[in-house]
Amino acid sequence: MLVFIYGGSGSGKSEFAEQYICNACGTDRDKLYIATMKESGEDGKRRIQRHRDRRRDMGFITVEKPVRPGELEDVKEYVLLECVSNLLANEMYETYDTDDTDASDSDHDDMGDGDRASTGAVIVEGILNDISDIERRSRLMVVVSNDIFSDGVDYPESVREYMKALADINKSLVKAADEVYEVTAGIAIKRKLL
């Protein structure tokens, strides 16, 4: 079963996702938490620590996987992937060496917007395949993503390409999901159900 949860920054979508999966299987069962946010700057460190503190007693086994989550071998019955927007940014804008932990910008120094756009579809397909693979190996997979489409700002081409790729992923996940929830100000609204 696939559950897709989305909302704006600070909407409460992560808390809702964590509670959803705990309600489905309890806090005493092992649950895999795939964390995609890379630690950067003080704000990023605080945000990651806040998430870790909140889920400390929930029974999650956290794996930091900023790219290619489908490579994970040990997938539990219950999986939470948090979040697609970070995963996409990591895949689009950073290059990783073979151990997937260190970023290197050397391949992107002379990458223009057109080069990035041509790889966008490949990255989208790869992310969707990874999510589909993990879902097949689990009983319940909860996927969290951001809603970044309502501010009406005219962004540079590279940002618009990222937004298009995220929209493509989100639309595909909404279509594939058994349940979809939008979270606003901590309130979850069911948008699609079985």
Image: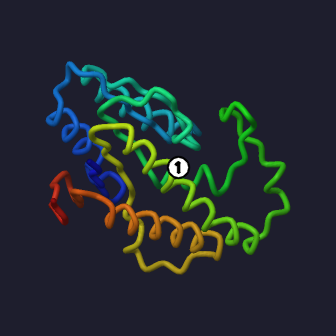
Q: Is any atom of residue 183 visible in this view?
A: no
How many labels were placed on the picture? 1
- Is the image coloured rainbow, by chain, by secondary structure, or in one colour? rainbow
Q: Nearer the viewer, residue 94 or 47?
A: 94
In this rendering, position of residue 19 left or right of residue 68:
left
Determine which residue is flagged by label 1. Answer: 87
In this rendering, position of residue 24 left or right of residue 64:
left
Using a 10 Å C-alpha cutoff, classify the residue at mark 1 as few (fewer than 14 neighbours), some (14 to 19) or many (20 or more): many
Q: Element under label 1?
A: helix
Q: Is residue 21 above or below residue 186?
A: above
Which residue is at 57% across, 76% downward? Answer: 155
Q: Nearer the viewer, residue 187 or 101?
A: 101
| Residue 153 in the image, given as x and y percentages of width and height | 48, 78
Q: Quarter of the image containing the C terminus?
A: bottom left
Which residue is at 45% across, 52% downward? Answer: 84
Q: Is residue 182 above or below residue 117?
A: above
| Residue 71 in the image, given as x and y percentages of width and height | 56, 37
Which residue is at 33% across, 61% downward? Answer: 176
